[in-house]
Amino acid sequence: MTVDQAVAGHAPPDISAGPVQSSLAKGEAREREEVRRGVTVADGGGGPELARVVPVSGRRRSVPRWLRRTVGPLALLVLWQVLSASGVLEADILASPGTIAATAGDLVSDGALPSAMLVSLQRVAVGLLLGGMTGVVLALASGLSRLGEDLIDATVQMLRSIPWVGVIPLFIIWLGIGEAPKIALISLGVAFHLYLNVYAGIRGVDAQLVEAGTSLGLSRWGLIRHVVLPGALPNAMTGLRYSLATAWLALVFGEQINADDGLGFLMNQAREFFRTDVIVVCLVVYAILGLIADFLVRTLERLLLQWRPTFTGQ
Amino acid sequence: MATDVHGSVTDTDTEPERRPYPGPVDSGAAVEVGGLVRSFGDRAVIDDLHLTIRPGEFVALLGRSGCGKSTLLRVLAGLDREIDGGVLVPRRKAVAFQAPRLMPWKRVWRNVLLGLPGRPERDAAIRALEEVGLGHRADAWPKTLSGGEAQRASLARALVREPDLLLLDEPFGALDALTRIKAQRLVAELWQERGCAVLLVTHDVEEALLLADRALVMEGGRIAYETAVDLPRPRDVSDPRFGALRARLLDRLGVEGKEGPEARETEPGTHADTSVAA
Ligand SMILES: Nc1ncnc2c1ncn2[C@@H]1O[C@H](COP(=O)(O)OP(=O)(O)O)[C@@H](O)[C@H]1O
Ligand SMILES: [Mg+2]
C-alpha cells in the first residue's frame, strides 16, 4: 500500500478518522480500513505509509521442526513412485520405490544389508576417529603455538591443494586393497576439514576476550581452556559437519576399491547383475546414514553452542 | 612528537614531569609510575609519564581520543609490558573495559568467577552480582543481557577479585544516558564501600567531576594537567564550582567551555593538587 508520500511529513497530525483522501486508491483505502479496525491508527490519510507488523504467534509453526525437515525427501519419494507407476520411468532404468522397498526387505531379512552396513559404518567410524584426532591434534599444535604453526600449517596448506580423492592410486600401491586404503582415505578427508576449521577457529578467537582473560589472571592453560577452545568450538563444529560429509564421500570412493564386503561391495555386485534396485537401496542407505550423522551433529551443535548470539532461522 | 602542542600549555602545569625521578619506590601508594615510556614503532604514545595514586583514591584520566589513555591503563593492568620506566601496581587489580568482554560461552555467574584462584563457590558470584543489582541474571547467557546489564556483570567480575586497584576504561561509554547515570552512581557507591583505588579513563568531563577526587588530563604522552576535585559528595552538576571546574577542564582539552576565557583567568594553581604531586 502506498500513501501519497509527498504530504507525509507536512500534514498536521489528525487524530480523528477523517474522510479518506481522494488520492488513495480504493484498494489502499480498504487496507487502511483493515488496519484501523485492529489498531487505532492516528492518521487522517496524510501520515506515512503503514505496514502491519505481524505478530510472530500468528504464524507460529504448528508442525515440529524435525517433521518439516522430512517433508522434502518424502515429496521426492512420492513423485518418483508416481513416475514409476505411470510408466514414465522404466524399471530397467530405475526401479520403483515399491520394488526397491521390497528388495530392501529381502536384503535386510537375509542379513546381507545389515552386515554390509555394519562393515561400512565401522570404516567411517574408524576413519572419522583417526582422521578427527589427527586433524584436531595438528590444529591445536599449530593454532596454539608459533612453532607449531611454522612447522605444520605451511605443510598442510601446501598439501591442501592436492585433491584428496586423487591419492587413491597411491594408497592402493602403499596399502594394498584391504581395509587400510579405505580407512586412510576417509581419515585424510576428515583430517583436512577438521584441521582447517579448528585452526581457523583458534586463530579467529576475539583478541579482546583473550586480553580480558589475561586481565582476570588466567594462566596460559586457563586461557586455552576457558577462552580459546570454547571460542574455536563453533568453527570446530562446522568442521565436524564438513568432515562427516567428506567421510561419507570418501567411503563411497574407497569402497569402489575392490571391496569384498560393505555397501560398496553390494553395489559393485549389483552393477554386474544390472540390479538397479539393489544399487538404489545402497544409495538410500548411504543417504540415510548421512542424514542421521548430520542430525547428530546438529543436535550436538544445539547442545554445545546454545550460548551463541547468532541467527537460528525461523 | 607532540611536544610543540604540549609546550604551549606547560607553563600552568603542575610539577610531575619536572620532578627528578628516583626510580619506583614502594611509598605506600596504590600506583607509582615514573618515567614510563611506551612506543609503537618510533612514536612514543606514552612519553616519560609520572603518576601516583593513593590507596583508596578515585582518579579520573581525561584526554583526547588517541592520546594514550587506554595504553596507560593496559600498562597498569599488566596487559602491555613492552615498556620502559618504572611501574608499581597492586598485585590485586581488576579491569573493566569499554566493552563488557564477557565470555559468551559462560553463563554470567561463571564469567564472574573466571580466573579466580582456588575453587570459588557460586555464592561468591551471586553476592558480587547482587551488589551490582544483577543477582537474578546469574544463570543467563551473556547474549541475553542488555548493554547496561552486561557492563554491570563486567563490574561484578572485577569487584569479586576484591582489587586494591580498579581500572575502568570508559566503562560507560557505550551506555545510553539514563543507564550511564545509574552505572555512575553504582560505581560511586561501590567505591565508597570498597575503598579501593580507582583509575577511571573517560572522555566525559562531567563524569570525571562527578566521581573523582582528582582529574588528570593526558596530553603529549604524559599527565599534562591535574586538578583536585574538592567538591562535596554527592556532587551537583548545577554547583557553580562544578561549572567552573568543568569549563577549565574542557578548556584544557581544547574544547571551549561556556565559561572558558573566564576560567582561564582564575586557573593558576588554585585547584592544582600539589600535595599529591609532592
Ligand atoms: N597496538 C597498537 N599498535 C600501534 N599503535 C597503537 C596500538 N595501540 C594503540 N596505538 C596508538 O596509540 C595511540 C593511543 O591509543 P589509545 O591509548 O588507545 O588512545 P585513547 O586515549 O583513545 O584510549 C593511538 O594513536 C593509537 O593509534
Ligand atoms: Mg581508549
Image: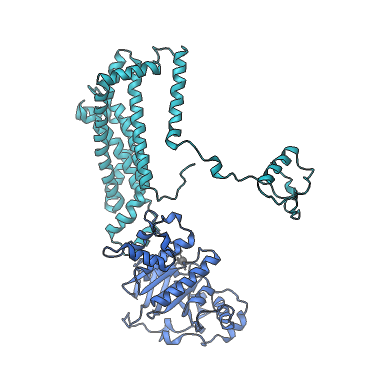
Chain colours: A cyan, B blue
B263 to B131, vertically: above or below: below
Q: Residue at x 65, y 45 (%)?
A: A38
Q: Residue at x 38, y 56 (%)?
A: B107
Q: Nearer the viewer, residue A140 or A8?
A: A8
Q: Quadrant where the C terminus of chain B lies?
A: bottom left
Q: Which quadrant of the view contains residue A179? A: top left
Q: Nearer the viewer, residue B38 or B210?
A: B210
Q: Position of residue B226 (x, y in %)?
A: 48, 80
Q: Nearer the viewer, residue A66 or A84?
A: A66
The answer to whether residue A269 is seen in the rendering is yes
Q: Position of residue A53 (x, y in %)?
A: 60, 46
Q: Which quadrant of the view contains residue A159? A: top left
**Total residue callouts:** 0
Q: Position of residue B231 (x, y in %)?
A: 51, 83
Q: Which quadrant of the view contains residue A248? A: top left
The answer to whether residue B39 is seen in the rendering is no
B70 to A133, vertically: above or below: below
Q: Is residue A11 left or right of residue B141?
A: right
B72 to A295, vertically: above or below: below
Q: Is residue A183 left or right of residue B62?
A: left
A187 to B257, vertically: above or below: above
Q: Nearer the viewer, residue A114 or A143?
A: A114
Q: Is residue A193 left or right of residue A130?
A: right
Q: Is residue A29 left or right of residue B243?
A: right
Q: Position of residue B210 (x, y in %)?
A: 51, 76
